[in-house]
């Protein structure tokens, strides 16, 4: 079943949270001269026009990127993230939201590599056009759980994998935890960034519990927007967004907490909006 379309959610608060933290991980990887590889197994389209009907319908981007875009000076810590969004909008008005492949590409140097995977036929066609002929980028069309197992360990041994499923199927949370566990076993030194929706009915808990069984340092950034369900979102139980990072870079946790608190202040919907940083498995 491939009914999920990310265009409805592009630039929403969950995307902002995920992309801000992803960019921090990439900045850390680029600090050393050695090459790195960034792998995105649920890549989506690469970039999203915000004027298209899907984005306008839910208007999630108005609760996310549009708020930060309107007051950039209020969020200095988010400047590197906003720079990438600005680069996607060279004419000054916010009309395009960059997807995770664009945030990854923004962090690449000539000797780094970007591996993208997407299963939806229409999305992968758009993604291939977005990637163009950049020799650093490879695009695959496979099931993500199969791709992640097949692509790891990568030839370049430093890097990050983003796992950003649409969680559409029964058992998706458990299956994602199992795929990540297998992947960490194949590439124990890789950094894994796993996004999940923070749901009022706690459906995401089996994912968190499953990941916790992996023997690696692991930190969770939990952005509770107290949104009471984004009004027009297909999933009205969405309170916020979660990101788990396995093998987080040094000092990432402290930075993630500051960034998360800033996002809770800027994007919170209710009085109980907050950010919580939890080590699920301690640092070694
Ligand atoms: C949350 S969206 C990804 C958004 C993207 N990572 C970003 O941040 O811009 C999830 C994507 O996974 C794709 N997808 C769904 N099931 C998949 C599967 N089994 N294998 C690979 N991709 C899948 C969907 O088509 C969708 O584009």
Image (cartoon, rainbow, N blue to C red):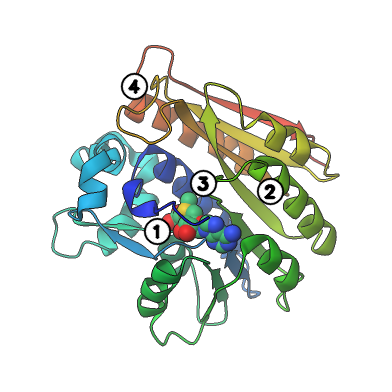
The residue lying toward the viewer, choosing from 219 and 224, is 224
Q: Which tag, 3 or 2, sits closer to the chain's start? A: 3
Task: Tell me, yes or no, whether the two marked residues, 1 and 2, touch with CB atoms within 8 Å.
Answer: no
Cα separation, mark 4 vs mark 3, equals 20 Å
Q: Which tag, 1 or 2, sits closer to the chain's start? A: 1
Residue at image mark 2: 176
Q: Is label 4 or label 3 in front? A: 4
Picture disc at residue 269: 4
- The crowd level at tag 1 (other Cα within 10 Å; few <14, some 14-19, many 20+) is many
Query: Within the image, what quadrant is residue 41 found in?
Result: bottom right
Quadrant holding the C terminus = top right
Q: Which tag, 2 or 4, sits closer to the chain's start? A: 2
Q: Is residue 116 above or below residue 89?
A: below
Q: Is label 1 or label 2 in front? A: 2
**For numbered disc 4, what is the local secondary structure?**
loop
Residue that protrudes farthest toward the front in the picture: 1
- Residue 204 horizontal side relative to residue 198, left or right: right
Q: Is label 2 or label 4 in front? A: 2
Q: Which tag, 1 or 4, sits closer to the chain's start? A: 1
Residue at image mark 3: 21
Relative image position of residue 170 (x, y in whole percent): 63, 41
The residue lying toward the viewer, choosing from 219 and 119, is 119
Residue at 62% over, 65% down: 143
The answer to whether residue 251 is visible is no
């Amino acid at each position: 079943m491939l009914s999920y379309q990310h265009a409805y959610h592009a630039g929403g608060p969950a995307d902002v949270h995920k992309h801000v933290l992803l960019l921090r991980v990439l900045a850390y990887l680029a600090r050393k001269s050695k090459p790195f590889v960034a792998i995105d197994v649920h890549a989506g389209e690469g970039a999203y026009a915000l004027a298209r009907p899907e984005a306008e319908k839910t208007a999630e981007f108005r609760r996310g990127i549009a708020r930060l875009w309107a007051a950039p000076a209020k969020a200095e810590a988010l400047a590197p993230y906003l720079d990438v969004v600005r680069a996607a909008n060279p004419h000054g008005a916010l009309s395009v939201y960059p997807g995770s492949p664009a945030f990854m590409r923004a962090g690449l140097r000539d000797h780094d590599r970007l591996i993208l995977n997407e299963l939806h036929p229409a999305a992968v066609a758009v993604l291939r056009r977005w990637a163009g002929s950049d020799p650093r980028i490879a695009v695959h069309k496979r099931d993500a759980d199969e791709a992640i197992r097949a692509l790891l360990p990568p030839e370049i041994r430093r890097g990050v994998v983003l796992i950003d499923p649409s969680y559409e199927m029964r058992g998706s949370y458990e299956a994602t935890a199992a795929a990540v566990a297998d992947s960490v076993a194949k590439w124990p030194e890789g950094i894994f960034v796993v996004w999940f929706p923070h749901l009022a009915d706690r459906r995401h808990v089996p994912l968190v519990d499953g990941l916790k069984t992996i023997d690696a340092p692991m930190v969770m950034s939990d952005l509770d927007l107290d949104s009471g369900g984004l009004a027009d979102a297909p999933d009205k139980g969405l309170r916020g967004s979660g990101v788990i990072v396995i093998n987080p870079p040094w000092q990432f946790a402290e930075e993630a907490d500051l960034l998360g608190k800033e996002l809770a202040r800027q994007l919170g919907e209710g009085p109980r909006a907050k950010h919580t940083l939890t080590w699920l498995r301690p640092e070694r």
